Each structure stands twice: as structure tokens, then as C-alpha cells.
Image: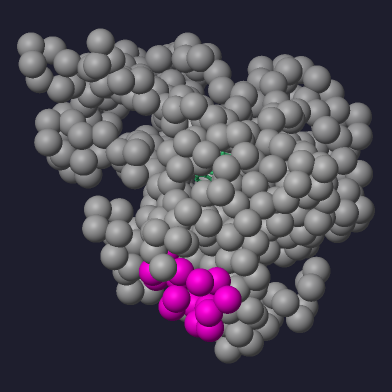
Amino acid sequence: MWNRELETISRKDLEALQTKKLKTAMEAAAKTTYYSGVFRENGIDPAKITTLDHLKDLPFATKNDLRLSYPDGMVAVPRSEIVRMHASSGTTGKSTVIFYTMNDINAWADLLARSMVATGTTRDDVFQNMMGYGLFTGGLGLHYGAERLGCMVIPSASGNSIRQIQLMQDFGTTVIHITPSYALHLVEEIRNRGIDPRGLKVKKAYLGAEPYSEATRDKIQDQWDMEAYNSYGLSELNGPGVAFDCAHRCGMHLWEDCYYMEVINPETGERLPEGEEGELVLTHLNREAMPMLRYRTRDLTRVIPEPCKCGRTHRRIERIKGRTDDMFIIGGVNVFPSQIETVLMDVPEVGNNYQIVLEREGGLDRIHIKVELRSEMFQGDLRDLDRLKKRIVEQLRSLIVVTARIELLEPGSLPPSTGKAVRVVDNRKI
Ligand code: AMP
Ligand code: ZN
């Protein structure tokens, strides 16, 4: 373990620690224009915080609040204390900006080193970081964590598959950090060059930055012959390192000494009982430059209340099902892209890329799914393709109750993804 005392702390001590930290976090927040206004309007005095329950009186913060307080309405320290900024990749709408002091950067790197150790990575590993460097937090976030741990870091950044493959081969990369969609694309590029991906030294991948299904994880693990670990974070709360799979890969430990979590009903804002699925709301418990209290992540998950076999006491969250703003409604039915992905990736003939296109024809919503198949599928009988199409339509219908139009494509037909994939194209607004 990276920090045995903190990672296996008793729930009682953890709560006491969280309460103490919450008070400090709220005092820091009071120094910002945004929170001082919120505290005043809601009659909140940070000096009087004695339990975590006091947080309930505080209204949620949203991405829009961040945008409205741009550029420094949420900053709690003088400009001279700030050593770095990042920006969200703009999963939805305009990006938002996050600032860090040196202590914030160090605490963040520590959480990532802790996360990597939880997966069994050591200083002997060669870590190739295939996430975007720059304003996006995915690159530099893991980079600093891996260096802290002592790995040899290859900051290859995203894209340029030929160079990625060469680096993996020449330097014996053992751990990669990559989006699931790029992992699926890259493995095809590897095979297209006549290289057996299973023969590479890569034994672990950290997959994050976008929602994906368990079936996709299985597929990636199988094609690369490695273990894939789920990594969750968002720039508003630092970036990656909020929650991470441990060696058991059965839900991500959310680092509760740094983040206080709540799960709410996204429609009513009510806090849900432990274990129920809803929207994750996070409070950062020790950030200096940019305190963040009760931030609505828009991400849907549930807490897994049972203790983990690894002995860490920080509770786990289930893989993110999607974002509340990802969901689309087709013919009156709520659909998450992850549900469609689960069906597709469970079909053995399906390849590594797909796209969901929403259209309106004659006033009716239609869903059109473009699916790449494995190349062998185009060598046999065309009637097989027809049967396969029918099977996919049926499986989708039983799950999402709508009839989709399926288009089967050869590998490489759809635009490849090297970063966050664009899975849904909604043409209905035009
Ligand atoms: P950004 O702030 O641009 O890094 O984007 C953060 C968002 O990416 C999160 O709020 C999630 O919606 C998504 N995300 C990050 N990691 C994961 C993950 N492991 N699984 C699903 N979604 C993720
Ligand atoms: Zn565990």
C-alpha cells in the first residue's frame, strides 16, 4: 500500500478526519467571491461546522457556476500562489478552468501514486501515458503520479499510433494509460502491422476519461492479453485519481480522505440511501487554490457498501453508467449509450468501433447504429450478415424497447478515436 494508515483507516476515524477537513475546506472557500456569497445567502458560518451533516444546508455547485465565476471567482489564494491551471475537455459545452497551488499538485500526485500502487504497479514498471497532455488533466495528472511512484514514464500523449507501437516495443512498456476507445483502435493498428498484441510486454492498462461497459473492458483485456483498471476523475475535482480500481477490479475506491461523496436523485436533489444509483456529488476536502463543495458531477453511479477484499476501507463506486446529460430520449424511451454498448460488445462478431446516429424522419425519432465487424465476417456468406443484423436488432429491442436500424461496416470505416470518443451524433436538432 502507498499509505497504509490512510487507506485502511476505520470508518469512524475517517468520518472524524472528513469533518475536520470539511471545516478547513469551508474556511478556505469563504475566501472566494463565489462561496462567500453562497454562505451569506444561506446563513452558513464555516466556523460552526461540527458534523458532515451541516453540508446539507449548502446548495450544489454546477459547471455553470464555474463558468459564471470565470476566471477567478472561485479562487481562494493570491495569483502568486498558483502554479498551474488546467481546463476541462468540454465533455459538454464550453470548458471550465481549474487552478492549483504547489500543495494541490503534490496532493494530487500522491493520490495517483496511491491509485497506481493499489493496482500493483511498482517503480520497476515502464509507464506509457497515451492521454492528451496540455490543458486536459489526463496526461499530466497520471504523469506526476507515476513519477512520484518511480516508474519510468514515457509521455507519448494521445494519437500517432505508429510511434506508440514503436515506443511500446523499444522500451518494453508494461503499463499504459489510454481511453477505452483508443485502446480498441490501437490494438487494431497493432494487428494491421502484423504484430501480435499479446506478444507485447504490456500487462496493465488504466482506462478512463469516458464511459464504457464491462463488456468493453473484457474485450480490451482479451485482445491485448492484459488487465484493465478503471480510472475515474474530472477536472473540477483535480482530474484522474478521484476513484480507481484496486487489484480486485470490482468497483473503484473513491479516496474518501480527500473527497466527500454523496449520491443524489438527479431530478429532486434528494440524497439517496447508500447503494442506490444516482448522481455523484463531490466535495474536495483539501484543495487550496480552488475549493469545491458539493459539486454535481452529472455522473451516474452507485456506492458499493460491502467492504473490499483488498482491505482498503474507502468505499467503492460502480463503473459510471453515463452522464445525466448523455442520456437521450428516443420515441419516449430513455436510453444511455452505455446500454447500447453493452449489447454490441457482447456480440462476438462485432469489432472495435461503433457510432450511434439519431435522426428524425417524418416527425419520428429513429436510431441508426453503425457497427464495425471483425474482418473475417466479410469473407463468408452474405446471408450470415443478414442473420447477424437481425440478431443485434432483437437484442437491442429486448433491452431498450426501440427498433434500431443497424448498418454493418468493415473495420476502419468509422472515424477512429484517439481521445474521448464521440459515440452519439444527434442530427435531430438540425
Ligand atoms: P474532464 O473533466 O474533461 O476530464 O471530464 C470528466 C468526465 O469524464 C467525468 O465527469 C465523466 O463523465 C467522464 N469520465 C472520466 N473517467 C471516467 C470513467 N472511468 N468512466 C466513465 N466516465 C468517465
Ligand atoms: Zn479493493
Q: Main secondary structure of the magenta part?
A: helix
Q: Position of residue 47 (x, y in %)?
A: 58, 76
Residue at 53% across, 78% down:
49
Figure check: 125 above or below 5 = above
Q: How is the image coloured?
A: one colour
Q: Position of residue 218 (x, y in %)?
A: 53, 47
Does the magenta-highlighted stretch encompass residue 53?
Answer: yes
Q: Quadrant of residue 98?
A: top right
388 or 272, nearer to the observer: 272
Residue at 72% across, 77% down:
6
Q: Position of residue 35 (x, y in %)?
A: 52, 55
Instruction: Indicate the quadrant containing the C terminus: top left, top right, bottom left or bottom right.
Output: top left
Q: Quadrant of residue 199?
A: top right
Instruction: Indicate the quadrant containing the N terminus: top left, top right, bottom left or bottom right.
Output: bottom right
Q: Which residues are magenta?
A: 44-58
18 or 395, nearer to the observer: 18
Residue at 20% across, 34% down:
329
Relative horizontal placement of residue 39, taking residue 277 as reference (left or right): right
**Number of marks:** 0
Residue 167 is at least partly visible in this image: yes
Residue 241 is at least partly visible in this image: no
Q: Quadrant of residue 279?
A: bottom left
Does the magenta-highlighted stretch encompass residue 297?
Answer: no
Q: Position of residue 124 (x, y in %)?
A: 92, 53
Relative horizontal placement of residue 121, taking residue 367 as reference (left or right): right
Relative horizontal placement of residue 368, taking residue 138 as reference (left or right): left
Residue at 81% across, 47% down:
81
